[in-house]
Image (cartoon, rainbow, N blue to C red):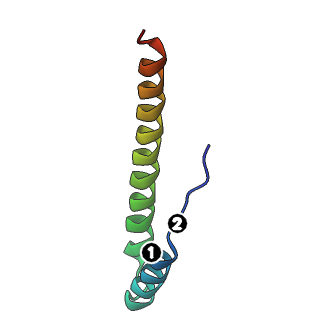
Amino acid sequence: QQPVITEPEMDRKDLLERKAVPSRPGNGSKLSAIILFLLKSQQDDSQRQKGEAGDRCASP
């Protein structure tokens, strides 16, 4: 499992957005849904990269 690399600018923007949004009960589930989506897309990317590497090795 690879560590998630975050851009400093992204972190600042995220913090600003989080401060701007009032904490309501609905926000947590929305945030976790976004995190789950990001994690899933990351896994898809790493699987795709592994597949491409395998194809390169297999091709003569």
Q: Are marks 2 and 1 in contact (CB under 8 Å)?
A: yes
Give x and y (percent) for residue 52: 41, 27
| Nearest to the observer: residue 1 or residue 37 | 1
**Vertically, is 44 above or below 19?**
above
x then y, percent, for residue 18: 44, 83
Tell me, for residue 52, which label it has, or none.
none
Depicted 20 relative to depicted 36: above or below: below
Q: Nearer the viewer, residue 55 or 4?
A: 55
- Quadrant where the image shows the C terminus: top left
For residue 22, above or below residue 55: below
Q: Residue at x 52, y 76 (%)?
A: 8
Q: Which residue is mark 1?
A: 10
Q: Residues within 10 Å of mark 1 (few under 14, many from 20)?
A: few
Q: Which residue is mark 2?
A: 6
Label 1 element class? helix
Residue 33: quadrant of the picture:
bottom left
Q: Secondary structure at mark 2?
A: loop
Placement of 4 over or under 13, stated as above or below: above
Quadrant location of the N terminus? top right
Q: Is residue 30 left or right of residue 46?
A: left
Q: Amino acid at mark 2?
A: Thr
